[in-house]
Image: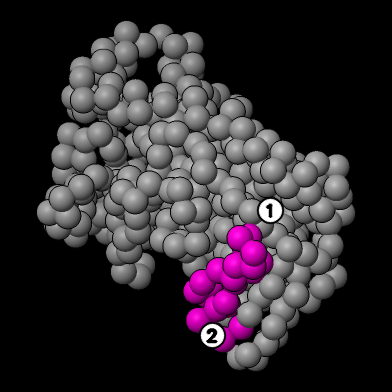
Amino acid sequence: MTATAATNPGTTIEADVAIVGAGPAGTATAVALGQLGVRGVVLTDTHGFPRDKTCGSGVSPKGIKVLRALGVWPEVERASVAIRGLRLVTPGGQDVSLSAGDELEAIICKRRVLDHLLLKRAQSLGVTFVPGCTARELIEDNGRVAGFRTREGHTVRADYTVVAGGAHCTLTTKERPKRTRLVQAIMGWWDNVPHRPDYVEMIFDRMLSPYYGWLFPESADRVNIGITYEDVDHAIKARELFQQFLDKHYAERLVDARQVGKWKGHPIAYDYSVGNLASPGRLVVGEAGRMTHPATGEGIYQGMRSGQLAATALDDMLSGRKSEVVASHAYEWRCKLAFEASFLAGGAFRKVLQTPLLDWAVTAGTHPAMQNMTAKVLARM
């Protein structure tokens, strides 16, 4: 096992592959490279681990499939809450419970736990982790990316650089559109809130249209509650909107609850199309490449899956099986096939939420079999 690397300011780190960011996208890339036998992989992050991350922490069925492939599912499953149903509140105020029966449909795994388990898996495969590295600028050599410099004074030189820095990352390809599509989120944590431990709650209130509020159980005692909303003109006061949502939907259930910590907000970057994920010496994965779901805000699955696909492309490049140009194009195409149809469907779902269609569907779907199917569709969207 390669231990966490300690570095001093001014240190130069050499790597075959350097990865910026140790969230699910970056760590999945590192794990997949290790599984393919690629050595000389350096994974960097601003923070040491374990560390907290503001996120609803939901992992979809597709995400569970990726966790299995990465060889970390048994550890993640033990640390997670299994989700087998959904409480859905429609824009028209209909309140229904949709069950997937005994099938495991999703999990809630706190990001502090999930990211650390993925990191430990990467390290067990020979990946070197370097905390305290905040990528500041790319190093360019003869028209190709050759690593990056950090705010802390380190230099990381690499044959290939993977950018996995999330929504705020500025190291993405120059061809990305200047105007970023953003969804805002704000959330908090509470103990002693009455809830069904194997159900998530999604509330499509018109005050948040076309988005929603949620309650996710993180343990038998703790839940996170939050909202997602658009604020194109930066006119919404997030804390006031969140308080209105809590007062309307959770006031009674929060009477005897204890709030844990402060409310936290974060942006979610998305796009409907997938592309512009590569340039000479560089691949972009996860939310840095705007690969998050436009309707649900889900990004853990997309981050991990794009990391797997990036690792395959990098292995092809390093082994000489494919040229960098061919492998990079293949990576972009595979990401497009994996995500774009779902993203376009998410855009259509956003429009549906501004009509009575969801209420009509819920009214028509009173039969248990129909409710079961609806729960599965929402889980896999």
- First along the sequence among labels 2 and 1: 1
Which residues, given as a range, are shown in magenta?
Answer: 133-154
Q: Quadrant of residue 141?
A: bottom right
On the question of residue 236 being in view, the answer is no
Q: Main secondary structure of the magenta part?
A: strand
- At 25% from the left and 34% from the top, the residue drawn is 210
Q: Is residue 133 above or below residue 265?
A: below
Q: Is residue 107 covered in magenta? A: no
Residue at 44%, 11% (x, y): give it.
370
Mark 2 or 1: in front is 2
**Quadrant location of the N terminus in the rendered image:** bottom right
Q: Position of residue 4 (x, y in %)?
A: 73, 77
Q: Dot 2: within a 10 Å radius of its alpha carbon, few (fewer than 14), some, or many (20 or more) residues? A: some
Q: Is residue 381 left or right of residue 13?
A: left
x, y percentage for residue 212?
A: 29, 39
Q: Which numbered dot is residue 152?
A: 2
Amino acid carrying label 2: it is Glu
**For residue 69, side relative to residue 80 (left or right):** right
Q: Nearer the viewer, residue 280 or 228?
A: 280
Crowd band around label 1 with a 10 angstrom C-alpha radius: few (<14), some (14–19), many (20+): many
Q: Secondary structure at mark 2?
A: loop
Residue of label 1: 29
Specify the quadrant of the image occupied by residue 200: top left
From what the image shows, is residue 373 above or below residue 194? above
Q: Nearer the viewer, residue 221 or 209?
A: 209
Q: In the displayed structure, would residue 126 be above or below residue 176?
A: below
Horizontal side of 368 relative to 326 (left or right) equals left
